[in-house]
Image: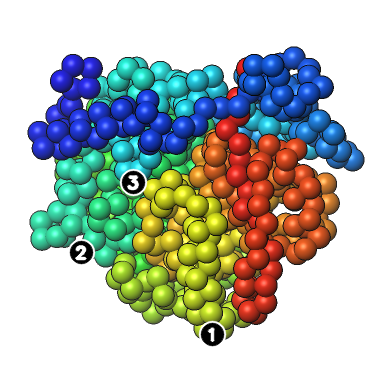
Amino acid sequence: MGGFAIGSAFDSKSGQMIMAALLLMIVSFYSGTLFGNNAPLYISHLPSPSSSSSNGTSRFTNKVTLTYRKTPLAIPETGVDVCPLKFNEYIPCHDVSYVATLMPNLDVSRKEELERHCPPLEKRLFCLVPPPMDYKIPIKWPLSRDYVWRSNVNHTHLAEVKGGQNWVHEKNQLWWFPGGGTHFKNGASEYIERLGHMITNETGDLRSAGVVQVLDLGCGVASFSAYLLPLDIRTMSFAPKDNHENQIQFALERGIGAMISALSTKQLPYPTDSFEMIHCSRCRIDFHENDGILLKELDRLLRSNGYFVYSAPPAYRKDKDFPVIWDTLVNLTTAMCWRLIARKVQTAIWIKENNQPSCLLQNAEQKLINVCDVNDESKPSWNIPLKNCIQVRNSNAESNKLPPSHERLSVFSERLKKIGINQDEFTSDSLFWHDQIRHYWRLMNVKETEIRNVMDMNAFYGGFAVALTNFPVWVMNVVPATTKNTLSGIFDRGLIGTFHDWCEPFSSYPRTYDLLHANYLFSQYKNLGEGCLLEDIMLEMDRLTRSLGFIIIRDEEHVMSRIQELAPKFLWDVESHLLENKEKKMETVLICRKKFWAIL
């Protein structure tokens, strides 16, 4: 098959289907039918007083110049400045050059340098992040699972060091993802099937084992997550920004849910009791160190009767210090009342059993484990130091009684009730967004397949994401850290998401979302001062949004007027529409679209 030969990860039928899809993609791209006839509009390095040039390539007055955030903030009349091209992958809170200045004060033994470190306001760039040279509108899902444009993520390191494990291979203008990983180089599907057999004693799969939501630690290019989708299993995948360069960027470019994060000194930004399975395939996390404090964080996140899957050298190798590490892990997990249920083919699996509370109290009496004080779970897990203890939870808790996957979307969680939300309000929210999605797609005037990566920036109860269930999308549900913890209720609906404070940039690469939804987000931050201004949040929206991506905004009228005024300076097209709100009154909805522009 020449340059597009299909490897052993696919059977011949799959290979033929992908080959046909590839040929269609290439023909469609050059005829302009797959992506539309979209070429970028150019911004010149040279100053120009005009909004257009003689050859029609320069359309804007925005200047290309390195600009930092100033106080007070002022937007130039020429528009928001554009960062120089070398900043095309700028991630403010994971900026290697800034982290380097902090290194003397960071605990490198615990890999603290991999966590979020947001620079002070005056050291943050305030300019539009440009796309790289030869950037193309991303390939559409589901083909993007296996192929993305090489020029969009123009880094070769992973292909060079992980190609033999079938993470990613170069195929002319494309990156090809065969579906492999360090411990599943023959394909994630085979590995996932094996895990299901290990858990169920060869009688079922992960879905029949009750797995609905998975946390994938050190996810690489997220092939594990991609191949869980046919089982209707949603995965929150994360990895740090480390020497496995751009692994999360590859994942998001493929259309797979992922974010930058690290398990180091702080709690992960997810609620307690949120996952039926936590997965580590050579995740390079030292669980045996520091009295097992990282394992105790996994215990916080794992639901009762949930599984910890550990595919790493200590589970199978007998050389070096791996046997000592294994013995330490066994002692730690035993003290935490996890039970080892399988160990074979380079993988060990533990279960956090439902009888854990009584077992923990016994172990605490014997000084084998520390029990945490009662935790206020109404507060978001955001910037909270790790705790070297285990939370004892009621074995009859509501989180243990969640229904199967297909029934969870309508679950009104007991955890929402505890923070003052009633079921009528919850049901009304779900019905409202189901109706609004139909209007949104009409107003955006695009096919369903044009949208893949979606973020709800102020997700409330997750009704917006539930309304998108039958669309070919995944949704990152973000609950602001300044509000109550409704994210627990969102996870109880079988969805995924994260806590975040929008006074800071998000932990993701530029150009990673096709649609951002901001429902009364700006008004939540209107009195929180510098760094939380409307303009700051708009800049971060622009960084996260793909070229030709959409931003849908609903908010107070004065906020909407200001956004309409500023949108052209951010190189957004904006349309104003009227839709009914929850009170059946008409309100303004802004449909913004980021122009496809590049530096000339």
**Residue annotated with mark 2:** 208
Mark 2 belongs to which amino acid? Ser
**Residue annotated with mark 1:** 424
- Dot 2: what SS? loop
Asked whether, in this view, residue 314 is left or right of residue 540, the answer is left
Residue contact at pointers 1 and 3, CB within 8 angstroms: no
Quarter of the image for the N terminus: give it.
top left
**Residue annotated with mark 3:** 225
Q: Earlier in the sequence, mark 2 or mark 3?
A: 2
Asked whether, in this view, residue 286 is left or right of residue 380, the answer is left
In the rendered view, would you say 251 is above or below 275? above
At 45% from the left and 22% from the top, the residue drawn is 151
At 63% from the left and 20% from the top, the residue drawn is 57
Quarter of the image for the C terminus: give it.
top right
Mark 1 belongs to which amino acid? Asp
Viewer-closest of 204 and 169: 169
For disc 3, the neighbor class at 10 Å (few under 14, some 14 to 19, many from 20) is many
In the rendered view, would you say 152 is above or below 238? above
At 10% from the left and 60% from the top, the residue drawn is 203
Asked if one can make out residue 177 in the rendered structure from this viewpoint, the answer is no
For disc 1, the neighbor class at 10 Å (few under 14, some 14 to 19, many from 20) is few
Measured Cα–Cα span from mark 2 to mark 3: 17 Å
At 41% from the left and 31% from the top, the residue drawn is 32
Q: Position of residue 274 (x, y in %)?
A: 43, 62
Q: Position of residue 442 (x, y in %)?
A: 50, 59
- Dot 3: what SS? helix
Q: Residue furthest front?
A: 54
